[in-house]
Image (spheres, rainbow, N blue to C red):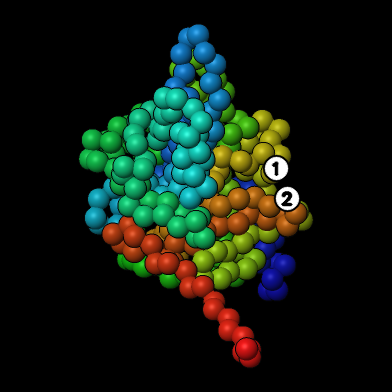
Amino acid sequence: MDDEDVRRKATEEAGRALGEEMAKFPLLFAKAVFYGQRPTRHRPTQINNGTICLVDFGRGPCGITCWHVLDGYRKAREGIDDVLFQVGSTDLDPIAQLIDEDERLDIAVIEFTAKQAGEITAGGKIGSEFFRPVTWPAPAVHQGEYVVFGGFPGSMRTLMSFNEIDFPSWSSGGSQVSSASDYQFVSAFERLFWVKSFGEAHNMDLTALGGVSGGPAFVKRRLHWDIVGIVKEYSENYDAMFFASLSSFHSDGTLEQPIVEQRRERGRW
């Protein structure tokens, strides 16, 4: 069986009930995160949102999201009074609870208290659990493997009232990794094989996936799942989803800083 046959078979599986169930899996550990000026009945507010991945590596509950999501909140605080930051319906200060962050990796790690963790996972199946890996670190993701991932696109959110927002979810039940490096991996959407997942009913286009940043990505390996990364961004130019690898993630929530290549030149003076 050649590569094209393997991809076609995987696509057929993704389109069946099994694929739908696999697509639901990452949403168990994903929650919408949003920030903006605290709304009132008399003042409209602009909300930005992303996704946060719920994990527990044995040191307590924490959330992993993209650095650029946290940076957006920082910038909002500079120009807006009374800015909120919420994970689901839980209001918190992500800066005060920040474990670690890295702009180059595009990862930020936020610690949750036991009370916050209980509030975050209450109220429905989506975002109802903290993922606990079988072992850590997990084997790195490789080219040719299939990842499942999901999150909360901003284009699908609905303002229900001045202080209530509905965040429908979107997920993919199997997307092949086209390239992988130490700090990121990429999944190109091959139109011949790609199967639309949740969101099709909303006539959602791939370019409308802003807000999925921070969503968890998993690989199924034998009898267990491994969490291997979080969504960074969808690139329209490459027609591909870019993920931040969690290979640099330590079990205490700290990040191993990426190696910066140093170049030297000889000269005379």
Q: Position of residue 32 (x, y in %)?
A: 46, 36
**Where 115 falls versus 109 (above or below)?**
above
Identify the secondary structure beneath mark 2: loop
Looking at the rendered image, the quarter that the N terminus falls into is bottom right
Residue 196 vs residue 72: left or right?
Answer: right
Q: Residue at the spot x=39%, y=67% of the render?
A: 256
Query: Nearest the camera: 5 or 81?
Result: 81
Q: Residue at the spot x=25%, y=57% of the render?
A: 58
Looking at the rendered image, the quarter that the C terminus falls into is bottom right
**Where 178 falls versus 230 (above or below)?**
below
Residue 125 vs residue 116: left or right?
Answer: right
Q: Position of residue 171 (x, y in %)?
A: 56, 44
Residue that badge 1 annotates: 207
Identify the secondary structure beneath mark 1: helix
Q: Which amino acid type corresponds to the residue marked 2 in the rendered image?
A: Glu
User: Pointer 2: residues within 10 angstroms few (<14), some, or many (20+)?
Assistant: few
Q: Are marks 1 and 2 in contact (CB under 8 Å)?
A: yes
Q: Residue at the spot x=51%, y=73% of the render?
A: 260
Is any atom of residue 211 visible in this view?
yes
User: Pointer 1: residues within 10 angstroms few (<14), some, or many (20+)?
Assistant: few
Query: Nearest the camera: 247 or 102?
Result: 102
- Check the image and name the residue furthest to the front: 269
Residue that badge 2 annotates: 236
Mark 1 vs 2, N-terminal side: 1
Q: Which amino acid type corresponds to the residue marked 1 in the rendered image?
A: Thr
- Quarter location, residue 156: top right
Query: Nearest the camera: 140 or 40?
Result: 40
